[in-house]
Structures are given as structure tokens and as C-alpha cells.
């Protein structure tokens, strides 16, 4: 078997024009071939995409199929594996040629190596676990048609965005995150968001803050929210319950502002300050602006 | 309408990291003094089904678990929350069933229990968190699957579900039968059963099977755990130096800029 890399992307004609795109860039970086399935990802329908991808994979007959960990990939991966007679595993942070995949389990408290027993291995990878490939010549893509599903039992009839086009939280390099200790929505909008802007950071929150309705659910990080892997995670007013830590076990550095010196979050921190955030953050913003100027 | 909700009993995920140990030989977490609890997303799934029944009326909810005999506790709690019927498939053969085995067991049990319009499962579990049960179950049954759903409404002979995406949400119409994986939001926080209902639940019937009854091979053919360990992470928190708040915050600002400038 050759060590061929084939990139499969969903793209509309419209998207493909401006694309030089995800798939092509990837392929040029890795010197692989590109297959484009002519389905506009903005018009994603589960059964249709799954069927098209299954057919393309049958044709290509790969040993491993790698996907990102977005919502659509996560729902497609196990079903694709089942249809191809393979095995899937998710949230991989490392994969070997023997199809052993390393992943966090028990909310990041333990790490497991999973041996896949069937091929193709269908693996969705945790965001930012692998450095992006770069360089190379862009090959021209091979286009294949979409696969019409004659009687789809499900149909997405409405799509609503609640974010303003910022990058995915999973891809963020710096995250400022607030918890129950913030005390209300004003603390987020008045203090944390301006701080995040100064640091070029994206905003996140703990389950407590989301459940309280202070910030959108899409901000939630933890066992029941997103799993993020930034270079810096600044946790403000977050005690660091197990369920929250489950979302940040892959963060490179954690820093915290918390009023309670015994808060478990400090056990995971590289640096921190024991103070009320209401005193720290306004001063911190002044200092950051002053130093940056 | 008949709804089946699958429930998994797991080691309490709130066990703090300092008390968490693994048995590297058997590749499993040590129970220690930790409680066994129902996986939160499974309880969100049951709550979502209960709320659907409250709105839609003529709905029967059956709960199903595949696990150790102790999983009966999760099912009794579900009955106390007012599920209509409960069934347990006792896992005798394989303490680490892989996701495909779990899906095959659940599919066989679902067929044995009756004819369902909707099967709800949690989005993932708080222990191994594979996040595959729903998708594989749907494939075993030849049904479609919708993931990350947080609410269900009836719409004629169909259901309309709301599901979360990373940037917002989608409304999806589905023609049953369909498998739904359920995630949490502020509306499906599991209810606390009344004391009286907890007592009553202990007297309700529980259907039990074992995997041999269902004719499912439980040996791991999909994947197996090759290693389980606790990652040793060096982390010593340096509290920023300074005698006054101003000095400390100044040190914090410099430290933050140092880190972000290096990116």
C-alpha cells in the first residue's frame, strides 16, 4: 500500500472558486490528491453527506480516515465507520501507524491508548493537537457529484448562528473564561470582554455561568461543553470543578484569578493571583493598555 | 408514541483528580469510595423525553440500561422521575464492551422490548466519553440519527428537534423512527424525583435480560483499550509577586503579555 494522502472536501461550485480552499491548501501542504464532493457545506444534510462520503471512501479504500472534531464530523464518524466495516474513535491527540489512538478519558483525569481492530480507522482529532502542515504545490481537485438521498427521513429546516463569525473556540490560542464568581452578565460584558480584546483572546465560560443565562451556551467549556486546547487559558472566578477541567485538559498553560486560594483551579495553574477579580481586572486592563502603548 | 431512553451508570465524574486512581492492569478506574451515578447526558435525555410527553400527551417512555447489576439503581431513579417502564441488560461477559458491542446489545434489547418511534441516548458518557453509541445504534437499526439535540416537539406525524452546533443551533424535521443523541441546555436539567415516587419506584417491575438471551457476541471486535494511565502533569502555581495589589497586578499583566507575545 502506498502512503498516499487524499483530501476529501465538501464544496459548492461557489465555495470552490474562492477556495484555493481548505482541501486544496491541505493537499498542497501534504502533496496529496484532493477529492471534492459537490455538496455546499452550508447546505449540509446529514444523510446526504454521510452517503456521499461513504461512497467516496469505498472508492478510495483508505486505511485511515481523519476528521476534525466539529459537530458534523463527530456525528458522521461512527456511522461512516459502521458502513465501511471499520472502527471509529474520537478526540484523538495522537495516532500511530498501528492504529493506536491516544485520547483523554474520565474527563481528562486519565489517558487511554485505544487499539482499533478494524479498518478503515475513522478518527476525529482534537483541535490543535497537531501542528498544521504547510507548503507545497496545489494539485487540481477531482470533483465528484453529490449523492442524492431519495427519501431522507431528516431535513435541517433552519440554521441559526449565535456567534459573530469569530473562530471556533476549539481553535483559539488565547481564551479568557469566566465562572460563577463573575456574579452576573455585567461582569462578562463590562470587565471580561474588554480584557479579552486587549489580550486578543476569545471568550468562554463555565457551566455555572451558562446555566445562569449570563452568557450564550456556545461559550461553555467543560465535560458538558467544548473541549479546548489554547496556549493560554485565563480562568476568572472559576473554582475548577472536575467537570470544567475536563474541557481544558489539553490547554498548554492555565492562569487564574480567584478570590479563594484553595480553589482547585490553582492546582492546574502555571501562574495566578488570589484576589477579587473586580479589583484585579480593571487595574489589569489599565496596565495592559499602558504597557502595550 | 413510544420512546426508549438508554441510560448508563458511571463512576461519579465529580471525583477530584487527587482521589482518582486507575488499575493499569485491568485498564479501568478504581472505584475507591466514589459513588456510581447516572451519566448526566442520559438524565438530560430522560428529562427531554418527559417534557415531550408532558406537551404531546400520548407517549410511553421506557428506560433501558446495559451494565452491571448495580445499574438497576439508575433505572429505579428513572422510574422515580416517572419513566413508564424499565429494562436492564446485565453485562456478564465483558467489563469493557466497546461502542459497537454496546450498540448491538441496545439494538437487540430495543427490538425485544417493542416497537419504538424515538430512541434517545446521551451525547457521550462522563467516563470513557466515546460519543458513539447513538450513531452506531442508528446504523445497527438502519435508522437515521440526529446529534446534540436539546429539545423535541411533535409536528404532525413528524418530530421537530432543536440541535446545538458550534456556532448556534439548527431546527431539524425528522420522520420516526429516529435515534437522537441528547445534549444539555438550561431547559433539560433533570428533575429531582419526589420521595414518594422514589419509594414507589422500588416496587415497579424491572425487565432483565442477559446478553446470551439477546444472542449478542460481547467480545471486543471494534476496539480495545491497550493502555490506561494518569498523565503526570507538572504544575506548580506561581502566585504573582508583590506586596500591594498594584504590584501584583503589574506582575500579572507582564506575565500575560509575555505569554501572548510569544504566540
Image (tube, coloured by chain):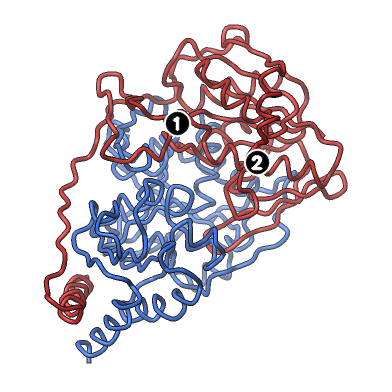
Chain colours: A blue, B red
**Residue B167, numbered circle:** none
Secondary structure beneath dot 1 equals: strand
Q: Nearer the viewer, residue B183 or A90?
A: B183
**In the rendered view, does B65 fall on the left or right side of B229?**
right
**In the rendered view, does B17 fall on the left or right side of A47?**
left
Q: Nearer the viewer, residue A278 or B103?
A: A278
The chain under label 1 reads A
For residue A7, above or below residue B27: below
For residue A84, above or below residue A283: above
Secondary structure beneath dot 2 equals: strand
Disc 2: which residue: B180
Looking at the rendered structure, the number of numbered marks drawn on it comes to: 2
Give percent across and percent down for residue B241: 12, 71
Give percent across and percent down for residue A72: 54, 51
Disc 1: which residue: A87
Spatial separation of the CA atoms under disc 1 and disc 2: 21 Å
Q: Quadrant of the N terminus of chain A?
A: top left
The chain under label 2 reads B
**In the rendered view, does A162 fall on the left or right side of A274?**
right
Answer whether labels 1 and 2 touch (C-beta < 8 Å).
no
Q: Nearer the viewer, residue B46 or B129?
A: B46
Q: Residue at x 75, y 43 (%)?
A: A153
Q: Residue most toward the top? A: B212
Q: Residue at x 61, y 48 (%)?
A: B189
For residue A5, above or below residue B81: below
Give percent across and percent down for residue A34: 43, 55
**In the rendered view, does A174 fall on the left or right side of B123?**
left
Q: Are marks 1 and 2 on the same chain?
A: no
Amino acid at each position: 500500500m502506498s502512503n498516499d494522502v487524499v483530501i476529501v472536501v465538501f464544496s459548492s461550485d461557489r465555495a470552490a472558486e474562492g477556495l484555493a480552499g481548505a482541501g486544496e491548501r491541505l493537499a498542497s501542504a501534504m502533496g496529496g490528491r484532493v477529492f471534492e464532493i459537490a455538496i455546499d457545506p452550508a447546505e449540509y444534510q446529514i444523510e446526504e453527506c454521510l452517503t456521499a462520503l461513504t461512497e467516496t471512501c469505498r472508492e478510495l479504500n483508505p486505511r485511515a480516515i481523519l476528521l476534525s472534531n466539529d459537530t458534523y464530523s463527530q456525528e458522521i464518524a461512527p456511522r461512516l465507520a459502521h458502513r465501511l466495516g471499520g472502527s471509529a474513535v474520537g478526540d484523538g491527540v495522537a495516532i500511530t501507524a498501528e492504529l493506536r489512538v491516544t485520547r483523554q478519558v474520565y474527563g481528562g483525569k486519565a489517558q487511554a491508548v485505544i487499539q482499533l481492530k478494524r479498518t478503515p480507522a475513522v478518527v476525529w482529532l482534537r483541535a490543535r493537537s497537531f501542528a498544521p502542515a504547510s507548503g507545497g504545490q496545489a494539485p487540481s481537485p477531482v470533483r465528484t457529484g453529490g449523492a442524492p438521498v431519495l427519501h431522507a427521513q431528516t431535513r435541517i429546516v433552519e440554521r441559526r448562528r449565535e456567534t459573530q463569525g469569530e473562530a471556533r473556540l476549539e481553535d483559539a490560542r488565547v481564551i479568557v473564561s469566566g465562572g460563577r464568581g463573575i456574579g452576573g452578565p455585567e461582569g462578562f460584558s463590562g470587565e471580561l470582554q474588554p480584557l479579552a480584546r486587549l489580550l486578543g483572546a476569545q471568550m468562554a465560560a463555565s457551566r455555572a455561568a451558562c446555566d445562569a443565562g449570563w452568557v450564550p451556551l456556545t461559550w461553555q467549556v467543560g465535560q458538558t461543553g467544548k473541549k479546548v486546547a489554547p496556549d493560554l487559558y485565563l480562568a476568572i472566578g472559576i473554582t475548577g470543578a472536575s467537570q470544567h477541567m475536563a474541557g481544558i485538559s489539553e490547554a498548554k498553560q492555565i492562569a487564574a484569578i480567584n478570590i479563594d486560594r484553595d480553589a482547585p483551579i490553582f492546582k492546574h495553574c502555571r501562574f495566578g493571583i488570589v484576589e477579587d477579580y473586580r479589583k484585579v481586572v480593571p487595574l489589569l486592563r489599565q496596565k495592559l493598555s499602558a504597557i502595550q502603548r | 408514541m413510544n420512546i426508549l431512553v438508554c441510560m448508563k451508570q458511571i463512576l461519579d465524574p465529580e471525583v477530584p483528580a487527587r482521589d482518582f486512581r486507575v488499575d493499569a492492569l485491568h485498564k479501568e478506574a478504581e472505584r475507591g469510595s466514589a459513588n456510581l451515578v447516572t451519566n448526566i447526558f442520559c438524565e438530560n435525555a430522560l428529562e427531554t423525553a418527559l417534557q415531550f410527553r408532558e406537551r404531546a400527551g400520548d407517549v410511553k417512555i421506557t428506560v433501558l440500561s446495559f451494565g452491571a447489576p448495580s445499574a438497576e439503581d439508575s433505572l429505579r431513579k428513572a422510574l422515580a422521575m416517572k419513566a413508564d417502564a424499565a429494562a436492564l441488560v446485565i453485562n456478564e461477559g465483558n467489563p469493557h464492551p466497546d461502542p459497537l458491542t454496546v450498540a448491538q446489545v441496545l439494538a437487540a434489547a430495543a427490538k425485544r422490548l417493542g416497537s419504538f418511534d424515538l430512541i434517545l441516548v446521551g451525547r457521550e458518557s462522563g467516563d470513557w466519553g466515546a460519543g458513539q453509541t447513538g450513531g452506531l445504534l442508528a446504523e445497527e437499526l438502519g435508522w437515521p440519527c440526529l446529534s446534540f439535540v436539546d429539545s423535541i416537539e411533535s409536528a404532525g406525524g413528524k418530530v421537530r428537534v432543536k440541535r446545538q452546533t458550534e456556532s448556534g443551533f439548527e431546527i431539524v424535521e425528522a420522520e420516526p423512527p429516529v435515534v437522537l443523541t441528547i445534549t444539555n441546555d438550561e431547559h433539560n436539567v433533570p428533575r429531582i424525583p419526589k420521595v414518594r415516587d422514589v419509594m414507589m419506584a422500588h416496587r415497579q417491575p424491572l425487565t432483565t435480560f442477559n446478553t446470551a438471551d439477546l444472542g449478542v457476541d460481547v467480545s471486543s471486535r471494534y476496539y480495545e483499550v491497550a493502555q490506561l494511565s494518569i498523565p503526570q502533569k507538572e504544575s506548580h502555581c506561581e502566585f504573582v509577586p508583590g506586596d500591594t495589589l498594584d504590584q501584583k497586578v503589574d506582575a500579572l499583566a507582564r506575565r500575560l503579555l509575555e505569554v501572548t507575545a510569544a504566540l
